[in-house]
Amino acid sequence: MKPVTYLILGGGSRGTTYAEYAREHPEKAKVVGVAEPRDFFRRRLAERHAIPGRQQFTTWEDALAVPRFADAAIVATQDNLHAEPAIAAVRAGYHLLLEKPMAPTEEECRRIIDAVKKSGVLFGVCHVLRYTDLTRNLREQILSDQIGDIISLQHLEPVGYWHQAHSFVRGNWRNEKESTFMLLAKSCHDLDWIRFIVGEPCRSVASFGALSHFTRQAKPPNAGTRCLQDCPAEVEARCPYSARKIYLQRAARGETGWPHDILTSSVTVESIADALRNGPYGRCVYECDNNVVDHQVVILNFCGGQTAAFTMTAFTEIGHRRTQIFGTHGEMWSDGETISRFDFLSDTWSKTPVSSGHATLLGGHGGGDYRLMEHFTAAVADGDQKQILSGPEESLESHLMVFAAEKARRQNKVIDLL
Ligand SMILES: NC(=O)c1ccc[n+]([C@@H]2O[C@H](COP(=O)([O-])OP(=O)(O)OC[C@H]3O[C@@H](n4cnc5c(N)ncnc54)[C@H](O)[C@@H]3O)[C@@H](O)[C@H]2O)c1
């Protein structure tokens, strides 16, 4: 079998991660093209995969202007730059793996799915949580009737205090105008996952949430505007969100991966200090142009009568998502590393440890990044959409749940989806 060939559109963090699958499995996949405007990232990806010069491009438009030269495209540009490259790629005949969220608006999501259906290509959204060993194991237990029928579920996404500060206060996803609203950016995974576990369409949804803490009103007295420059030492020492604490002290301990590699392409204590003095990540968290919420709850009512409660909050340690599922014959609890099940007949708990990752760049999201690539590549090799767990209809459906939940929060009312 010839390896499946890939064109990467957007060779930043995620594009580079997915491409890594080809280095781990050269017999199954090969990256043959890249479109990326930033020289360092484009060159790095091209070198890692020995991409010929004629198939290195600065923009997705340039890459899709030439006749199709790969089996599949991966669109890993930023949220507000998904719809156009995605539609152009499927029209050019590429099978498509599209980063989540599909797009920031319902209209764009529908246009993407229309284009996919018209062109008949294989399609997947990078809803990596569907692919983890934890999810597979949990579903196996549910589908083999280990807890009876699901009646309700609660699910927590602990974003983590410094992850919130990094991505959603100082970073790329801080402002809705530049990217999208928090629930879509961060938690479309979770609503999609809840839908996958419950196994029924959502009937109606309500939601509450706000930006409560990362505001000028919450700024400590006498704090400055930039951590390294004008914040008094005694004020900064009491701030858990200090950029010195989050980045510089960790870099000094030898940490060079995410999130440091977002600040600079070559991580040293000096380059991080420079980025903090001059760039967005050195700003006081109470003085940024952020407007996305830092906590939100969503309650969901499914067609089979099941209910679910979801919480996203910044104010946690960074950790695994936690879920409790309540069935007619048992209860399940997952902390991301173990699935515990209580059986009502025997009154006993049983525990199943699950793999929480894969020890490479593809190890993120509990091994979901790796398994997603494994499934998508096999689907393309076999021409079989069923091997993709996050296909067009279900991905659109779960995105519509997210748009409805956000509408419910903004309008302070229950929204019907059917
Ligand atoms: N599935 C997940 O769990 C997950 C996790 C994190 C991020 N994401 C999503 O992945 C996407 C990418 O995020 P990221 O962290 O890799 O961002 P990134 O900024 O590191 O990568 C995006 C890349 O697109 C490039 N780009 C910009 N304009 C372009 C153009 N015209 N043509 C080609 N490339 C262009 C940028 O230079 C950048 O390198 C986002 O939509 C994000 O929400 C998904």
Image (spheres, rainbow, N blue to C red):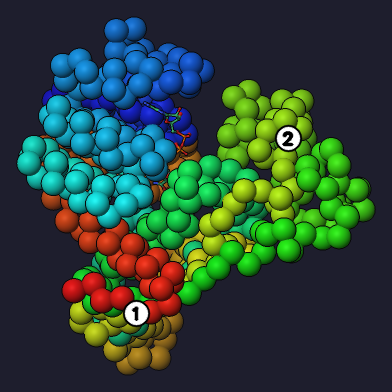
Please name the amino acid that badge 1 sits on. Answer: Val
Q: Position of residue 55 (x, y in %)?
A: 29, 13
Where, quadrant-wise, is the C terminus in this rendering?
bottom left
Along the polypeptide, which appears first: circle 1 or circle 2? 2
Could you tell whether 33 is left or right of 206 in the image? left
Q: Can residue 163 be seen in this view?
A: no
State the SS at label 1.
Answer: loop
Could you tell whether 212 is left or right of 109 in the image? right
State the SS at label 2.
Answer: helix
In the picture, residue 244 is in which quadrant? top right
Quick check: 256 above or below 408? Answer: above
Residue pictured at 72% horizontal, 54% vertical: 286
Quarter containing ligand 1? top left
Q: Does the residue labelled 1 lie within 8 Å of ligand 1?
A: no
Is the residue under label 2 in contact with that under label 1 (CB below 8 Å)?
no
Could you tell whether 274 is left or right of 39 in the image? right
Q: Where is residue 382 in the image (x, y as percent from the top left)?
A: 11, 37
| Residue 276, numbered label | 2
Query: How many numbered callouts?
Result: 2
Q: Which residue is label 1 attached to?
A: 414
